[in-house]
Image (cartoon, rainbow, N blue to C red):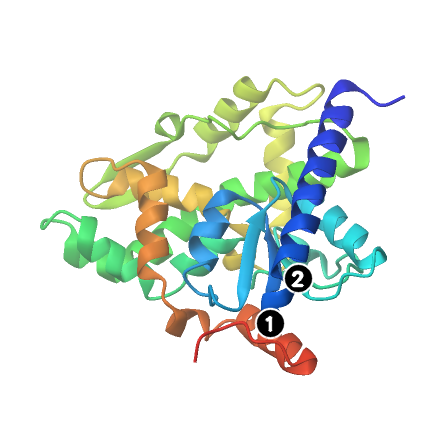
Amino acid sequence: MKNNSSIKRFVNLSRKLTEIRLRISNTRGQSKVFIILEGNTDIKLFRSLFSLRYTDTTSIQGKDNVEEALIILAKEGYIKFFGIVDADFSHLEKGYKDIPNIFLTDHHDGEVMMINSPALNSVVCELSSEKCLEILVENIKSNIFECASYIGYSRWFHEKESKLTEKYILKFDGLDFNKFITVKKCQIFLDKNKFLDTIIEYSKPENLTANDLSNKIENLKQKPKDYLQICNGHDLTKLLSLILFGNINPKKIESHLRVAFNIDYFKLTNLYKNIMEWSNKNNYLIFDE
């Protein structure tokens, strides 16, 4: 029997699919490609990159919902559509579901994709204090990725464990970074022991201690390091918010990154290349000339 959350998810997905079918039908005469994204912030990013003349974008909250929507639309015979979802840890796990017309971000998520581009330098120059500017331009990327990676390993463990047990192991939304992050001389430092204690106290997972979590993280760290896949973009922007002038809200930093991330940066990604291959193969237009 479905629980209330499953029923609510099913109803919301059904409503969204009805809306998508209507929008696809209304744009058929204009021959637009329909693009389904994970969230509203993704729309803000990609509608500035894709042609408004040739594409129509919408979002369905959650990666699972995007995947399910793509499967249903393909079964119903729709062809001129695709979806973009965050890779999360898929590139590290070396496997992903066989879903029609879906593209993964190059790195863990869209925010990491932007932070790994020259857009980060633009944001730092815009938001840094004069005292820290030179240090941040030189070191900020390596600094925040190093700190975020330890949190990322705990997220990776959480994802693996929750898939196996179907239980919610760790909580990250609303986690207070000030309890384990300090800022000194224009650099940020993560106290691993304080992080472990904080997330265990915050999450209250059954049969998992801070020492257990530390061991799980150390086991994952034995695998090849790829910070671009391990680090979560929202963790990175929270770290940026602590080190940039005036403790700027992470959402504002993400907004600045979206503005700074232009089509020339996007063209350097595998995501762009994969979308172009798909559009050329099907003779669809996605981008303005």
| Secondary element type, mark 2 | strand
Look at the image and tell me in which quarter the C terminus lies: bottom left
| Residue at 80 percent of width and 60 percent of height | 98
Location of residue 65 (image quadrant) = top right
- Relative image position of residue 189 (x, y in whole percent): 34, 40
Element type where label 1 sits in the image? helix
The reply to whether callout 1 and callout 2 are in contact (CB within 8 Å) is: yes
Of 259 and 56, the residue lying toward us: 56
Q: Residue at x 64, y 52 (%)?
A: 89
Q: Is residue 27 left or right of residue 145?
A: right
Which sits in the foreground, 136 or 19?
19
**Which residue is labeled 2 in the image?**
82
Q: Quadrant of the N terminus?
A: top right
Give the amino acid type for the residue marked by disc 1 in the picture. Answer: Ile
Using the numbered discs, state the Cα–Cα distance from disc 1 to disc 2 in whole angstroms. 9 Å
In terms of depth relative to the viewer, which is nearer, 272 or 187?
272
- Name the residue at 40% across, 34% down: 191
Residue beneath the point at 28% across and 58% down:
139
Residue 133 appears left or right of 139: left
Amino acid type indicated by mark 2: Phe
Residue 250 percent coordinates (x, y): 35, 39
Mark 1 sits on what residue?
Answer: 275
Residue 161 visible at all = no
Quick one: label 1, few (<14), some, or many (20+) residues within 10 Å?
some
Q: Earlier in the sequence, mark 1 or mark 2?
A: 2
Binning the other alpha carbons within 10 Å of mark 2 as few (below 14), some (14 to 19) or many (20 upward) gives many
117 or 211, which is in the foreground? 117
Against 146, is 192 above or below? above
